Amino acid sequence: MKRSTTLLLIVFEILLQIPHAHSAFSSTRYINGNHIRSSPSQTIRTPSFYSLAKKPFQESTPNKDVWQSFYNGLLQFKSANGNLNIPEDDPYNQDLRAWTIEQKRQYVLMKSGKKSKITKKRAAALEQIGLVNPM
């Protein structure tokens, strides 16, 4: 019963979205066989079923948690390899490599007095592990 109800809700959701899929359909109506074109503001939008449904558990990851995760990954890489040189062809650490390149770029911007996304505390942490050299 649950599976059929879920399937029915999915089909219903799809049917609700069909008139809004193409602008020709969403702004065209027929009244008494006459073609009437309405303005987009008159089109009724139905909210998505899935946007209304609450998931039982949604974890949000603020920027500080993402930064800390990459920083911890960099520390693990350093302890495993003895250095912070992530090879270009390393398929497992491409995200970490991109992150370290961006951190170095942001560090240089900050030290040259330009607008940067890195904080002084994070810059000090990167200096401490040897990713960047103090200027």
Image (tube, rainbow, N blue to C red):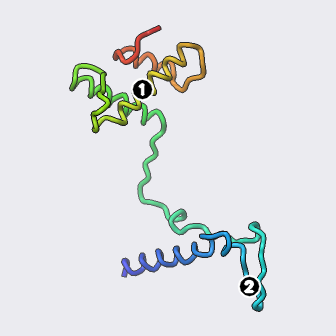
In the picture, residue 61 is in which quadrant? top left
* C-beta proximity under 8 Å, tags 1 and 2: no
Q: Is residue 36 above or below residue 56?
A: below
What percent of the width, then of the height, locates residue 51? 53, 62
The residue indicated by pointer 1 is 101
Q: Secondary structure at mark 2?
A: strand
What percent of the width, then of the height, locates residue 25? 66, 75
What percent of the width, then of the height, locates residue 67? 43, 32
Residue 48 relative to residue 27: left or right: left
Q: Is residue 100 above or below residue 19?
A: above
Question: Most extreme residue toward the top, as rendered?
Answer: 135
What percent of the width, then of the height, locates residue 113? 59, 14
Identify the image quadrant of the N terminus: bottom left
Q: Work out whether residue 44 or residue 30 is closer to the camera in this orientation and state it.
A: 30
Q: Is residue 49 above or below residue 2?
A: above
Q: Work out whether residue 30 or residue 128 is closer to the camera in this orientation and state it.
A: 30
In the picture, residue 3 is in which quadrant? bottom left
Residue 21 relative to residue 98: left or right: right
The residue indicated by pointer 2 is 30
Name which residue lies at 51% across and 22% down. 119
The residues bearing labels 1 and 2 have C-alpha atoms spaced at a distance of 58 Å
At label 2, the amino acid type is Tyr
Q: Secondary structure at mark 1?
A: helix
Crowd class of label 1 (few under 14; some 14 to 19; many from 20; radius 10 Å): few
At label 1, the amino acid type is Ile
Q: Work out whether residue 55 or residue 51 is closer to the camera in this orientation and state it.
A: 51
Name which residue lies at 41% across and 11% down. 133
Name which residue lies at 77% across and 76% down. 37
Crowd class of label 2 (few under 14; some 14 to 19; many from 20; radius 10 Å): few
In the picture, residue 8 is in which quadrant? bottom left
